Amino acid sequence: MILLRFSLLPLLSLLLIAALLSTGCWAMDPRFELDPAQVQKKSIHTDGPKKPARRASRRSAKTQRGVLALHKHAVEKEQPGSVLQLAAAGSPAAPDQQQIRVFWDKLVPAGMSAPQPLIFKSEVFDLAIDPTRYPLLKAADGRTLLLDTGGTLPPLVRTLIQEKDPGIRIITASPADGRRFLGELLASGGFYSVEEQPVMTFGKDPQLKVRSDFKVEQSAESVMRNEVMLISAARQGYPLRLTEYLKGQGVKLLEPFAEQSASPVPLRHRVVRTASHDPAQVIDLLLETLAAPAERNKRVELFKTAESGIGLSVAAERYFERGGRRYVVARFTGDPITYTLFRLLETKGYRVVILEPHDSFNTVASKLLSRMDLPSRYSTHQLMTGPGGQYSFEMSGFMLENTASDGGSVMLTDRPIESAMRELLYDHGYQVQER
């Protein structure tokens, strides 16, 4: 039994060693793993005096040793040392890389020197990074950005770069995901402020809202110096007129991946704006917009002499008919008799709109439209919006849907509209008319 135990000990030891080797206890740190394609195994023969063939064959195992050498590009093989070349010379740049460089040149202040190629040399290794495959950008704070958009930079090389120059920031996101790529790039860009999903508002009523993916301020004085940057990762560009308007407001819009800008749409809607506060003029504007011809200063008969022996008529500032109904617009000055006559008109089937001297545009329009069974609420309406909510434009007034013969809408308002906003509305199918 004792002999059996001693005979099993060597076998158990071998099994234990095999189990240890099969586990990860001897695994190499992944940071120092090499790409097999970059490694070549070479045989180095030790020079020595020639021996007879029989004796030399016995010593061949002692005089030859396997050496791992980093594979060098053919152009670099004549250089001394081990040079790690990460891409073949002349490899074409990715389609988006040129767009990224043009975008970055617009974003980073001019006058900064271009980053130098990354070349590191030591007694142990020489490392060179191909700037064609791994572009370099200069950050706003002077640091260097290295773009590894394909994720092909080996972990060992990344570790060597960061150990040699900790100030180098490596960007690994791909431009295929534009928003994620720009987020990582801008976060490493050394700017004073980077805000995600900003919403910028221009004006109060009307009001233009512009949304983008990022807002960048290069310094604390960027707002005062008109150096605010809005950045969009969308493929659909903003309208050209909107870009020009933002530029006039001191905001620069950058779209590195935009393939085309929004095209104008055919005119279909109208925005009718009046600057008058006279109730009679407001009534005329509304009736003209609604294509309802009216008679001025008409006498509307309540009773006819031929019928009852009594003739009674009421003065109407405007009289019109629409949809088989009769409408009277009259002015009330506070006389209770006049008010009674207006009520008598209503008993005769007339729809009476009573105006008072201090009525505003909102009040006059609301009175007329309500009597005509049209939308009579003065409220804020959204006239246009960009794809994906990139921008929106809203203003207060009365919105009359499907008023035009082609199904277009009419917006009645008294709010002033600046010329740049009129052009933007025009591109979105709205014709602005001033009365």
Image (cartoon, rainbow, N blue to C red):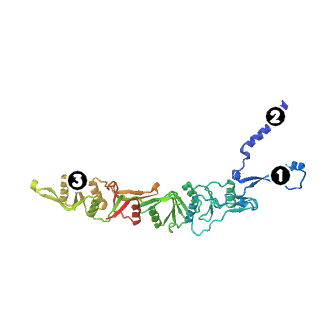
Alpha carbons under labels 1 and 2: distance apart: 38 Å
| Quadrant holding the C terminus | bottom left
The residue indicated by pointer 1 is 64
Query: Which sits earlier in the primary sequence, circle 2 or circle 3?
Result: 2
**Camera-side residue of 430 and 26:** 430
Which secondary structure, mark 2?
helix
Tag 2: residue type? Leu
What x and y, as percent, mark residue 168? 65, 61
Residues at marks 2 and 3, CA–CA distance in whole angstroms: 114 Å
Q: Nearer the viewer, residue 49 or 143?
A: 49
Left or right: residue 63 compared with residue 205: right
In the picture as drawn, the residue positioned furthest to the top comes out as 1
Residue at the farthest front position: 53
Residue corresponding to mark 2: 8
Q: Amino acid at mark 1?
A: Gln
* Direction from residue 110 to residue 415 in the image, left or right: left
The tag on residue 325 is 3
Residue 347 in the image: above or below residue 240: above
